[in-house]
Amino acid sequence: MKRIWAIATGIVLALMVFVPSAWAGDVDGAQIFTNNCAACHLGGGNVINGAKTLKMADLTANGKDTVEAIQTQVTNGNGAMPAFGGRLTESEIEAVANYVLAQADSGW
């Protein structure tokens, strides 16, 4: 019985090292967007500046059409947009950036 317990413990520890998302849970970009971004960007729009929506044409025109560019924008803010780097974790910012780009690709 001790041998089985030792093997099971080893498997659990290996999973914790190699599959951290299994323990931490997936970060939900859609929920992060709803909680932090939708007030200004509902449906991919922009209530502050209509020329800077989250639609693909505007993202491209403003140089924000990559996950990395969106992450930078969300982290640091710019103009009327506040910085979320102090409020969201890196994984949350990455998740919301992926969500925004996927939504833009599908036309919101």
Image: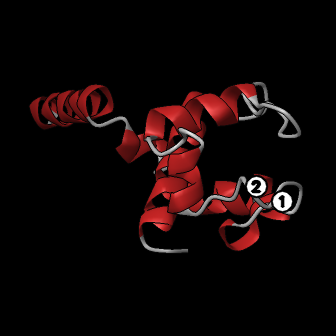
Quick one: label 2, few (<14), some, or many (20+) residues within 10 Å? some
Instruction: Work out whether 102 lies above or below 98.
Output: below
Count the marks: how many? 2
Using the rendered image of the protein, determine whether residue 91 is visible from the camera's viewpoint: no
In 3D space, how far apart are the residues under numbered discs 1 and 2 (Cα atoms)? 6 Å
Q: Which residue is mark 2?
A: 37
* Residues tagged 1 and 2 counted as in contact (Cβ below 8 A): yes
What is the x, y in percent for residue 47? 87, 63
Helix, strand or loop at mark 1 = helix
Instruction: Work out whether 31 lies above or below 78.
Output: below
Q: Which residue type carries mark 1?
A: Cys
Quarter holding the N terminus?
Answer: top left
What is the x, y in percent for residue 6? 18, 27
Instruction: Work out whether 22 lies above or below 71.
Output: below
Helix, strand or loop at mark 2 = loop
What is the x, y in percent for residue 77? 76, 31
Quarter of the figure with residue 51: bottom right
Q: Is residue 47 left or right of residue 46?
A: right
Q: Which residue type carries mark 2?
A: Cys
Quick one: label 1, few (<14), some, or many (20+) residues within 10 Å? some
Quarter of the figure with residue 17: top left
Q: How is the image coloured?
A: secondary structure
Q: Nearer the viewer, residue 12 or 49?
A: 49
Q: Which residue is mark 1?
A: 40
What is the x, y in percent for residue 106? 43, 73
